[in-house]
Image (cartoon, rainbow, N blue to C red):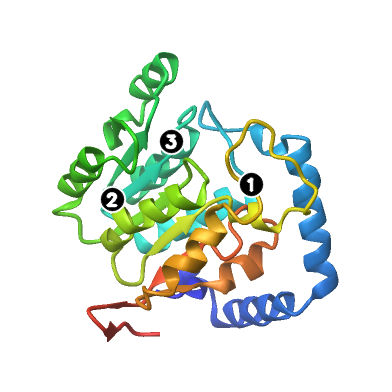
């Protein structure tokens, strides 16, 4: 599955025009620079904290919500693994698409699931598609639980959005990326931290320039050729918190998938 197959029912002319337009975006330096500046301004104003999905707050950029929806609908996974729960909006987003598809579960992992958030998630109409695991996503016992939950899943998507330090994200990739099915994705959010201005200050956060999800992705990919960065997603979105973070699995045990 390549990203341009996320509109498989669209007429050929539409799909061809879309592909050509996105290819132009890839080389549109002015448009990309504007998008980057907008994202910087949005972070400074906490713009991404304004949204919700079916009643639960969701801390994501709207374009990233759109991309997750498209990937879920195209891949139709048996299991979505998400690290980082916060208020639960992202879990509800995934569960709502799986509900429309008619199958699949969402597994949410967080080191601290606050009582009011847990209650709201467990009382939501889509709770039957959601399983919560409280614990550090890189703790061996948590990793073991997730792998046990995933053992019968044939199609798996992984969304990493918890602690954004290099070491933590690298450990998450090592723990969960192997669960991703061929032609599916591991999405690493907040890689844009590396792209923020050098003088940007991350107050009360342990991550920053040189220590963030993008640096972890770069290191991890050096030894995992079975994954590639799907730039076509970022080229279409332009405004995303995950530049270089849409990782598509293209091979397993050295066998290449179809293009």
Q: CA distance from mark 2 to mark 1?
A: 23 Å
Query: What kind of element bears circle 1?
Result: helix
Identify the residue under disc 2.
Answer: 79
- Decide: few, some or many residues near mark 1? Use Cα within 10 Å; few <14, some 14-19, many ≥20: some
What residue appears at the point 35 percent right and 72 percent down from the top-left corner?
Answer: 183
Answer left or right for 155 relative to 18.
left
Q: Earlier in the sequence, mark 1 or mark 3?
A: 1
Residues 215 and 179: in front is: 215
Query: What kind of element bears circle 2?
Result: strand
Q: In which quadrant of the rendered view does residue 27 lie?
A: bottom right
- Decide: few, some or many residues near mark 2? Use Cα within 10 Å; few <14, some 14-19, many ≥20: many
What residue appears at the point 42 percent right and 37 percent down from the top-left corner?
Answer: 91
Q: Position of residue 208 (x, y in %)?
A: 64, 48
- Label annotation for residue 92: 3
Identify the residue under disc 1.
Answer: 62
Query: What kind of element bears circle 3?
Result: helix
- Label annotation for residue 21: none
Q: In which quadrant of the rendered view does residue 51 lie?
A: top right
């Amino acid at each position: 599955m390549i990203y341009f197959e996320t509109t498989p029912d669209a007429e050929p002319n539409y799909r061809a025009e879309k592909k050509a337009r996105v290819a132009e975006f890839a080389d549109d330096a002015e448009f990309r620079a504007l998008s980057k500046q907008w994202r910087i301004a949005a972070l400074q104003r906490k713009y991404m904290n304004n949204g919700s999905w079916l009643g639960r707050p969701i801390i994501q950029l709207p374009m990233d919500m759109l991309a997750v929806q498209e990937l879920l609908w195209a891949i139709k996974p048996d299991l979505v693994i998400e690290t980082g729960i916060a208020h639960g909006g992202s879990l509800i987003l995934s569960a709502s698409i799986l509900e429309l598809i008619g199958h699949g579960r969402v597994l949410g992992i967080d080191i601290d699931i606050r009582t009011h958030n847990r209650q709201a998630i467990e009382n939501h109409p889509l709770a039957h598609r959601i399983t919560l695991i409280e614990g550090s996503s890189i703790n061996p016992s948590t990793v073991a639980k997730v792998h046990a939950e995933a053992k019968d899943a044939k199609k798996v998507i992984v969304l990493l959005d918890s602690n954004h330090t290099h070491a933590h994200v690298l450990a998450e990739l090592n723990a969960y990326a192997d669960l991703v099915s061929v032609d599916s994705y591991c999405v690493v959010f907040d890689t844009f931290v590396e792209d923020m201005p050098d003088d940007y200050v991350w107050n009360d956060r342990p991550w920053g320039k040189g220590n963030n999800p993008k640096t972890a992705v770069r290191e991890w990919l050096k030894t995992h050729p079975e994954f590639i960065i799907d730039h076509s997603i970022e080229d279409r979105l332009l405004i995303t918190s995950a530049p270089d973070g849409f990782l598509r699995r293209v091979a397993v045990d050295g066998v290449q998938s179809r293009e």
